[in-house]
Image (cartoon, rainbow, N blue to C red):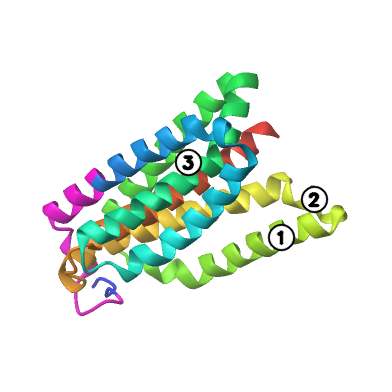
Amino acid sequence: MYNRSPYAAVQVADGVEGSLMGRTLGYLAVLLLILSASALISPVTGEVGLWIGIGAALLGTIMVGRNRGSARHAFTWGTVVAIGMGLLVGPVVWSVALTQESLLWSTLGTLIVAVLFAALLVSWIPWDFSRMMPLLFIGLIMLLVTGLLSWIVPGLSGIAMSRAYNIIGVLVFLGYMMVDFSLMRARGRVVPADGAAVVLAVSLLIDIVNLFLFLLRLGRR
């Protein structure tokens, strides 16, 4: 007997509609391209670009879920998220590319393996991975609080840069990625909104970017 999806009486092992998976991966590919283009121009924007990136990423993340009824509107806000995150991660990527190019490529390789691992694990194990969300949320709050306090309390900066902190970050966002892959199995049936694929794509985009950053910081240690 399989666990039940939290969305409705749908078996977790029922699989995912091919059309939903195709649209989600298609939107994700386009958003990754937009993010990459935004990261390329990030050095030109400077510090202003960082603040624009923070505002765009936060606002877009909120609005994309509120516009899930329309794929066009949801994708517009998803584009805002991708541009914002590109402006945020661009300086980091440029810095590593210019000083530690091998680290950048090894991190990208590890990221691809991690994404494939999460997808295969969810496809092989008929379990509702969304049940991990309360535990993942606690881990996310711990990361956020520690990161914010490290800006205020100098003594905590070492903790925020520690190997343990980055390992927790990797595990949290790898877990969120598995949750999103698991939710994909049922969302096409129980959340039939036109923009459901866009919402999933944006969620996966956020998981991938954060996982990349934590893997990069972990590789620097």
User: Closer to the camera, 127 or 119?
Assistant: 119
* Residue located farthest toward the right when viewing the structure as drawn: 155
- Between the C-alphas of marks 3 and 2, the distance is 25 Å
- Which-is-in-front pick, marks 3 and 2? 3
- Between the C-alphas of marks 2 and 1, the distance is 10 Å
Q: Secondary structure at mark 2?
A: helix
Q: Where is residue 97 shown, x and y percent of the image?
A: 57, 23
Q: Quadrant of residue 117?
A: top left
Q: Which residue is mark 2?
A: 157
Query: Quick one: quadrant of the C terminus?
Result: top right
Q: Amino acid at mark 2?
A: Ser
Task: Report the disc number at residue 148.
Answer: 1
The residue at the point 53 percent across, 68 percent down is 137
The residue at the point 59 percent across, 34 percent down is 91
Q: Amino acid at mark 3?
A: Gly
Q: Which residues are magenta?
A: 6-26
Query: Quick one: quadrant of the N terminus?
Result: bottom left
Task: Report the disc number at residue 183.
Answer: none
Q: Is residue 144 left or right of residue 191?
A: right
Q: Where is residue 190 shown, x and y percent of the image?
A: 19, 73
Q: Which residue is mark 3?
A: 86
